Amino acid sequence: MSTESGSLHTLFNKGTLWRGRQTEGQSRPQCLSSGYPQLDALLPGQGWPASQLVELLYREEGSGELGLLLPLLAELSQQERWLLWVDPPHIPYAPALRDAGVNLDRVQVVRSNSRRDRLWCLEQSLKSGCCSAVLGWLPTGQEKAIRRLQVAANEGDCRGFLFRHSRCQDQHSAAPCRLLLEPHPEGVTVSALKRRGGWPLPPRLVPVQSAAPAVVAAEERKPKRTRPQLRLVGSRDEADSASH
């Protein structure tokens, strides 16, 4: 009996066995608070995990998806690494970001020319080590791509956030954390569909204002013909042409 107990103790010390209600233990990635206690209670490690992808799923834009991230983006923007936005549906509204405490000098926006270029840019930026957070908007049916992006986020020690339609919630995903967002008069209801080291949890109301309209307000006020084409990084083909 003592031999069995000793062997079991050895396996626990090696981290080979998982005990009920145990999350990541000492190997858990560093987490940063979301700024919302209600949301932290849903997240693994009580905050946004490092080196991982988080999927934010919602039915329509303006469901509070950006408002949930603003406190984190403000904190990360005080570091030397970049906050990269890849193909946002609207041009980010700089005054709203600045008012939320985001250092605009650390923000970069990328416009790709194709879905293939978008995935390439996301993967390269996640694993580059130059970004503290990468935000990307993806359509449905990207299971293999998400697996690659999770590997890239881990390699580059980068937080990755993928914005997707709620119809994707039944699709398989390699993202360790998946959150379903639903608008609520007092904020946004967040359900943890998947979280590493824990079971899915029931919805919680997070008192965040819908930040998306404020972030894109300037874009909505501009006539379509004067919409600026903000492309800070071109495609690989363009880069190759410029080098010749």
Image (cartoon, rainbow, N blue to C red):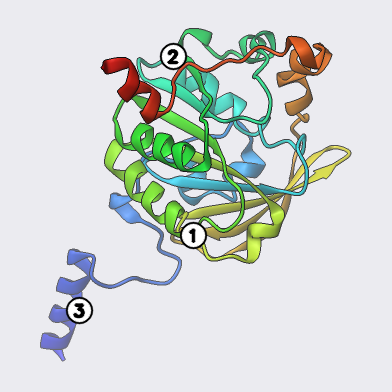
In the rendered structure, find residue 182 and report the number of the disc placed on it. Answer: none
Residue 216 in picture, x, y percent from top left:
73, 20
Mark 3, residue position = 8
Q: How many numbered marks are there? A: 3
- Which residue type carries mark 1? Glu
Judged left or right of residue 203, residue 84 is left
- Cβ atoms at labels 1 and 2 below 8 Å apart: no
Q: CA distance from mark 3 to mark 1?
A: 37 Å
Viewer-closest of 112 and 43? 112
Evaluate whether residue 175 shows in this view: yes
Mark 2, residue position = 78
Q: Residue at x 49, y 21 (%)?
A: 75
Residue 87 in picture, x, y percent from top left:
57, 30
- Which residue type carries mark 3? Leu
Q: Outermost residue, right direction?
A: 185
Q: Residue at x 36, y 20 (%)?
A: 81
Residue 131 in picture, x, y percent from top left:
37, 26
In the rendered structure, find residue 143 and report the number of the disc placed on it. Answer: 1
Say if 79 sits above or below 29 in the image.
above
